Amino acid sequence: MHIQELAVLRQNGSLLTTHWNSDLPHISCHFTTKYSNTGKIFACKHLNQHEGLFTRFVLQGIRDWKIISSAAPGLKFRALSSSSSSSPPSAENTESPETLSRYSDRPWEYLESEEYIERYGAKPVWANYRRNHKGGVPPQQTRKTCIRGDKICGNPCPICRDPNIIVHYKNVNLLQQFISPQTGIVHDPTRTGVCMKQQKLLNKAIETARDCGLLAVQLPHVDYSKEDYSNTHGAVAPTPAPVSLRSGELWYSWYGSIKPDERELARVKRIYKDYLKPDV
Amino acid sequence: MAAFSFTKYFLRSYFCFKCVDHVQTRLQTTTRMFCVSASRSSFQDAPKAQFTDTEVQDLLTRITGLDLQKVFRPIRQQLTPPKYKLMTDTELEEAVCKAEEQAKHLLKMPPVLPERKPVNDVLSEDQMLEGMDTAKYVFTDINFNVPHRERFIVVREPSGTLRKATWNERDRLIQVYFPKEGRKITPPPIFKEENLRVVFEQDRHEDVLNQCIVQFEPDSAEFKNVLMLTYEDIEKHGKYDLLRSTRFFGGLAWHLVNGRRVDGLLVDMLQRDLMQDAVRLVRLFNLVHPQSESAQQAQRQQATDLDLLKIYAQYESNRAGFIELAVQTYEQTKAMSSF
């Protein structure tokens, strides 16, 4: 293995692969990245169908590593045939496939397109997906994510394998496929096979769609018989003005009726004799 | 009130006279005056039927109808295995009666209340607390056995004033401490204009109304606004049947009757051959607007049933022709079937 070409990551985040060997057909690409101790030089292994190419990427810094990982989160190097019209030219490999997909602005249109119908028919997108696992009982949680950086796993989940399927709250037909038509509960990922990251996105999108009224919600019945709507209590109505005393009236009604003990009164008067007013 | 106290004064002055004939004639004159003044005031003040009157409620429930298939249509819920029962005819009838009672309970109309007055009460102003903090402090009484409308919620502003919380703040905080199922702390975006438009295009007015009654209190401004928008949209497109046999039909009918826009609904009822419902609607109109032409004519002629419809069509309606034609065809078919 020897260093054949140099890829330079520009400040703006785009990856310049100027010395790319275009003779080799890009049939299947497998990217792995290793983070080195210095934090500046990264080793990238590019495996081709015929031979392994060791490509060294010289990067500007840790900042750029972050850019590279965000610029290619959904780099979906799936099996592209060179004759396929949807295979983007190599210059576009630098952009993420979310922008590559023709339906990124209006993801709901894909579900009416011919390629969707040809691929899935009337069944939900997860109908023909089968998880690969050991033993009869599958792990109770699907994988965390299908795509890590530039790498896509083997047997990606039904949403990740098709870049045109975008989880969006307005994409109601897609969201409906992941909700049970009888109970209205979102299907468990062990049933549909989606990875946990996409499941979280799905849950969020379904919640937003229900909030905006695009999906039906089952609400409890509201009973109005037990509440009083007169709004007369002081908590919600203006506080009544304090009762002003008429002359001779006492503040508490029991002031006049309770009489003090005579001996106690005399004793207290004797103790505080110096402080009492002269007429008392 | 003034008339009453007037008569009371007069009565007291009578018994001082101790002359029976004088008293009797005086009493008669005063009572006669009282009656005359009362009837005059009734026409001017218009003892309008309120939403809570028994007669109005009865009419509205009858107009709403009771379609068991629609009320008990399958909803999305946790499924249980179905149960099969073998019943005799009487048991089946009893079961249907029970279902009807349950349906009546489900079709109870949400109340139509006047809008709640804003709470602007300042309890104290303490200048020495000014600038103590940059945030408001809200103190809520979270005793469990206090009704929510009697719960004290006060706010201490950064300027030092202690005031009672506004209605919006009250609703939010009560939802925080005593959460109700289905209600969100901030109103969901479905109640925005553009989302409402989308939902109305899909004919899902009932869902919007369900969301509305779960989210808002019945005397709040937002509740009334959403209800008004929904009713307006229904009336604009004539989609009255969407709400028939739901708990919102009474509110819709009440809104239209108060706005004197009964024609659309009346025509829709006649098209569906709901003659009795049409008659009840006109009766409701006469109750709510007693000084209108049709109400007065009906009062004079003591009209019943189809005559009410004819009087209404004659005096008040814009679609007089259609209503009269429908009434005529109904009478003819009735006459034909009776032969």
Image (cartoon, helix red, strand yellow):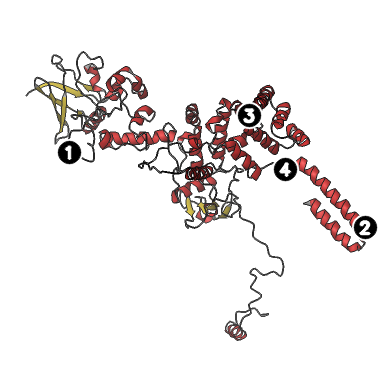
Q: Secondary structure at mark 1?
A: loop
Marked residue nearer the N-terminal end (4 or 3): 4
Mark with earlier residue (3, 2): 2
C-beta proximity under 8 Å, tags 1 and 2: no
Q: Is residue B152 left or right of residue A217?
A: right
Spatial CA distance of label 3 from label 2 is 57 Å
A176 versus B145 height, above or below: above
Q: Are the residues under badges 3 and 2 in a single subunit?
A: yes
Tell me the SS state at disc 4: loop
The amino acid type, in three-letter code, at marker 3 is Leu
The residue at the point 42 percent across, 31 percent down is A214
Q: Nearer the viewer, mark 4 or mark 1?
A: 1
Q: Can the viewer see residue A171 in this picture? A: no
For the residue pair B297 and B279, the one nearer the viewer reads as B279
Q: Nearer the viewer, mark 3 or mark 2?
A: 3
According to the picture, the residue beneath numbered tag 3 turns out to be B266
Q: At label 4, which amino acid type do we have? A: Pro
Question: In this figure, which residue is indicated by the disc labeled 1?
Answer: A136
Question: Of the residues tagged 4 and 3, which is closer to the observer?
Answer: 3
Which residue in the protein does label 4 denote? B47
For label 1, the crowd category at 10 Å Cα-Cα, with few meaning under 14, some 14 to 19 and many 20 or more, is few
Query: For residue A114, what is the image quadrant?
Result: top left
Q: Nearer the viewer, residue A121 or B63?
A: B63
Farthest residue in the left direction? A1
Q: Secondary structure at mark 2?
A: helix
Mark earlier in primary sequence (2, 4): 2
Identify the disc placed on residue B22. 2
Residue A215 quadrant: top left
